[in-house]
Image (cartoon, rainbow, N blue to C red):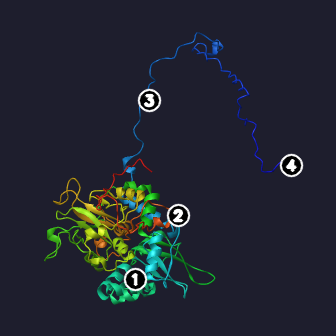
Amino acid sequence: MSSPFAPILSPLSTSRPTATSPLPPPPVIHRPASPAYITPSASSPSSGLTSGKPRRPSNSQPRLRARGHSSVDPSQIPTHEAGMTSIRQFLKGRSSYDVFPVSFRLIVLDNKLMVKKALGVMWQNGVISAPLWNSETSRFDGMLTVSDIIHLIQYYYYTQTYEGAATDVEHFRLEHVRDIERELHVPPPPLQSVHPLKPLFEASRQLQQTHARRLPLIDVDDQTGGDVVLSVLTQYRVLKFIAVNCPITYSLTRSLRACNIGTYVSSEDARPPGPISPYWPIATATLDTTVFDVVHMFSERGISAVPIVDEAGMVVNLYETVDVITLVRLGTYTSLDLTIAEALMRRSADFPGVVTCTPNDSLANLFQLIRKRRLHRLVVVAGDEGYEGRRKGSLVGIISLSDIMGYVISEDVGAEGMGLGLSAQKGDKSQSTTWGATLNETSEAEADAWSRDGAASSSTTPPFPPPIPLPEIDASQD
């Protein structure tokens, strides 16, 4: 009996010919006769379709029909204001859960976990923030973010020796992080969350008001009454969702400066009296600045990145909170006396560089860039034409995702726009400083990518990559 799993050969299948078996003769192909040309007289009804003398085809080129004018009325092209209104209506018609892909993962940390182990788990899974879980009450217990680690570094730098800090961190639990923040007189972050089915526009507004600019999506278990953490909504997810699903972003032709998106260097007349930085109100550093001085800027101003400039005001790099976390993960708790130049040498070789733009770049260009790659801030530099007396490449401002989100969800934007101004450098604890590899919609790396290996780079590539300019928008692309 033949096996039911025996292969079935179709009638068209043939065995491979052997050396002894002759090849079958080629099939005879019957070609139709060449078509005869029919003269106009032969095709007339009175002629009865009798074939006449074939007429050769004309060698002249066919006449091209004149192209008519475009049917699109210029007055029907959406304006910048109409585009923003359409985007806001789009957010109001979507739920918070619609932002997430079909498949994604979520890392949740128990608040009894040791800090050092928690950092290892976060690094292995490519995230820099995670929800905390209280297993005793089955409740959401807040978020662990980069800001919490920065506060921890400050505390040990002031109060402990290297040996004491190294020993304490080995046994320090996540549930005691809030105690450290109280010692530093840092206000505790509120336990804010949102239901997954809440409109995305309302969730985005609530997201702007959170301490960490991350909003957990929490449901309630009907049987146990406990919390169910589904995911975490971030600013990047919302803006990427808009960039991918709203083609009308191409109509946002107004410049970033005209929209007042970001923080910009003030003129000399607008600066307060006294010894003020020439880049006020933007916090800056040089390659000779110590890491701890920058960490103090992170904590005092609530920011997550500081532009590194040279003597001429040219942007040479960007130091982020993630760079400090790398030092902590490697065990160098008191290596904060290093200069920025020495700390940057410990970066991974896959650092993508500094993303820059000019004040005259449009908001459409920015959404085009968000759709193509991951970013969490842009350093604004002077373009070819300069900016208020500053030469090309010099620092002009900085734009965070908080500034972009604030402009998108603000329904009071007038003709000149209304940005959040100083949110990128003053009181903004959100800027989730994440440098990922390639954007991946089906993994958690799309939300919070942290792909650094923490080891000192042995590559011959210079440690200070040149700034990456904002590409020109191509309206022909999807």
Looking at numbered disc 1 in the image, what kind of residue is underneath it? Pro
Which residue is more in the foreground, 441 or 245?
441
Whether pointer 3 and pointer 1 mark residues with C-beta atoms closer than 8 Å, the reply is no
Secondary structure beneath dot 2 equals: loop
Could you give the CA–CA distance between mark 2 and mark 1, rounded to whole angstroms?
A: 28 Å
Q: Position of residue 381 (x, y in %)?
A: 25, 60
Q: Residue furthest front?
A: 20
To which residue does mark 2 refer? 101
Looking at numbered disc 3 in the image, what kind of residue is underneath it? Arg
Could you tell which of marks 2 and 4 lies nearer the N-terminus? 4
Q: Nearer the viewer, mark 3 or mark 4?
A: 4
Q: How many marks?
A: 4
Looking at numbered disc 2 in the image, what kind of residue is underneath it? Pro
To which residue does mark 1 refer? 189
Whether pointer 2 and pointer 1 mark residues with C-beta atoms closer than 8 Å, the reply is no
Could you tell which of marks 3 and 4 lies nearer the N-terminus? 4
Could you give the CA–CA distance between mark 3 and mark 4, rounded to whole angstroms?
A: 71 Å
Q: Position of residue 324 (x, y in %)?
A: 34, 74
Question: Compared to 275, does 21 lie above or below?
Answer: above
Could you tell which of marks 2 and 1 lies nearer the N-terminus? 2
Report which quarter residue 170 is drawn in: bottom left
